[in-house]
Each structure stands twice: as structure tokens, then as C-alpha cells.
Amino acid sequence: MNADQVLMEIREVNLSYLMLAQSLIRSDREQALYRLGISEQAADRLASLSPAQVLKLASGNTLLCRMRIDDDLV
């Protein structure tokens, strides 16, 4: 896998994450805050993003989500 492919995969993951986050926030805010591990302020901003803003944010080369795995769960 070359660098361009990795960047494309990161962008796809970011877009999927942002769309899922918006959907969760809009349908069940409390559950979204818990599941996503984000603050109320971050949730407000994510929910208010336009589709164009979501695409622009997702197009960066930095992964926007992170894995939250506790040793107890593994």
C-alpha cells in the first residue's frame, strides 16, 4: 500500500466517522457523548457542520477518531 492509498483510506474513515457521529448526536445525544467520548461543545460543533464542512474536515491527512480500548475489555 503506497502513501496515496493510505491517505485515501484515512479520508474515507474520517468521512464515515463524521457522518456516524452526526447521526448519533442527532438521534440520541447522551448516548453519542458517551459512545464517542466527546464533550458537549464538540457535539454541538459536529452536529452543526454542513455537508461541505464535513467533506473538508474529512479530507485532511490526520485520523479524526481514536480507539478507546481498556485493558479490562481485552
Image (cartoon, grey):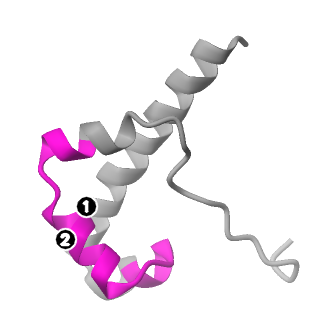
Mark 1 nearby-residue class (10 Å; few <14, some 14–19, many ≥20): some
11 magenta-colored: no
Dot 1 and dot 2 residues touching (CB under 8 Å): yes
Q: Nearer the viewer, residue 22 or 72?
A: 22
Residue at 26 percent of width and 61 percent of height:
22
Secondary structure under badge 2?
helix
The residue lying at 19 percent from left, 66 percent from top is 47
Q: Position of residue 58 (x, y in %)?
A: 37, 40
**Quadrant of the rendered structure where residue 16 is?**
top left
| Left or right position of 2 against 36 | right
Whole-percent x, y for residue 9 in the image = 55, 27
How many C-alpha atoms fall within 10 Å of the one at disc 2: few (<14), some, or many (≥20)? some
**25 or 59, which is in the foreground?**
59
SS for dot 1: helix
Label 2 sits on residue = 26
Give above or below for 68 relative to 39: above
Given residues 52 and 24, the one toward you in this image is 52
Q: Is residue 39 above or below residue 15?
A: below
User: What residue did someone put label 1 on?
Assistant: 23
Q: Which residues are magenta?
A: 33-54
